[in-house]
Amino acid sequence: VDLEPGDLIEIFRTRYQHWAVYVGLGNVIHLAPPTEYAEAGAASVKSLWANTAIVKKEQLSSVVGKDHYRVNNKHDSRYPARTPDQIISFAEKLEGKTIKYKITTQNCEHFCNILRYDVARSDQVSVVFGDLDNFFAVRVLGGG
C-alpha cells in the first residue's frame, strides 16, 4: 500500500472500521477510546459508551495489528482536502489530548474527516445505529 502523508486509513476491525490519518514515517494519528486496541474485536463494543478518547500518534503496524487496512480518501471528490502539511500540523497539535467522544457525532471517523476535510462525517454511524435500533426495538417491543 502506497501511503502519502494526510491519507485516511480505514482499518477493518470485527464489525466496524477504525480510522486513522497517516502522518509519515510509518506513523498514524487516531482517536482512541480507552477500549480501542488492535484486534479488539467484540470488546470494542464498549467504545459505544465511552465519553472521552485520546488523540494518539502510533506506528500504523501497532494500530492495525493483524487486521486489514486500506487508504480511503473517499470524500476527495466531494470536499476539498487540506494540504498534507495542514493535516499533519492540525493532527500533531491535538496529539496527547483527551477530547470528547460520542459514537454518533464524535468518533474516530468523524475525527479523521475533520482533519482531512474540515467536515465531521461518519458513514458507518447510520449502519451501526440502524442495527442497534432494531436490537432495541426487539428488546423493548418483544419483551426480551
Image: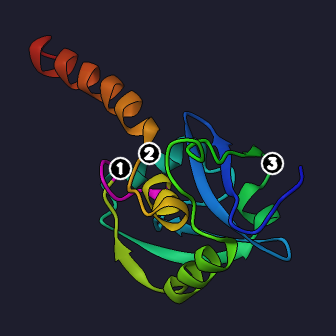
x 64%, y 71%: residue: 83
Residue pictured at 28% horizontal, 22% vertical? 135
SS assignment at label 1: helix
Tell me if label 1 and label 2 are in contact, CB under 8 Å: yes
Cα–Cα gap, marks 1 and 3: 23 Å
Predominant secondary structure, magenta span: loop
The residue furthest top is: 142
Using the image as rendered, state which of residue 57 and residue 34 is in the foreground. Answer: 57
Q: Amino acid at mark 2?
A: Val
Q: Is label 2 in contact with label 3 (beta carbons under 8 Å)?
A: no
- Amino acid bearing label 1: Leu
Name which residue lies at 61% across and 36% down: 14
Amino acid type, callout 3: Lys
The Cα atoms of the two marked residues, 2 and 3, are separated by 19 Å
Query: Which mark is on residue 48?
Result: 1
Q: Which residue is drawn at the image coordinates 63% and 42% (left, top)? A: 13
To which quarter of the image does residue 52 belong? bottom left
Taking the magenta stretch, the answer to whether it contains residue 106 is: yes
Q: How far apart are the two marked residues, 1 and 2, measured between alpha carbons?
A: 6 Å
Relative image position of residue 133 (x, y in whole percent): 24, 25
Nearer to me, 3 or 141: 3
> Whole-percent x and y of residue 121?
40, 49
As helix, strand or loop, the secondary structure at mark 2 comes to helix
Placement of 114 over or under 77, stated as above or below: below
Q: Which residues are magenta?
A: 103-108
Q: Position of residue 4 (x, y in %)?
A: 80, 63
Residue beneath disc 2: 45
Quarter where residue 3 is shown: bottom right
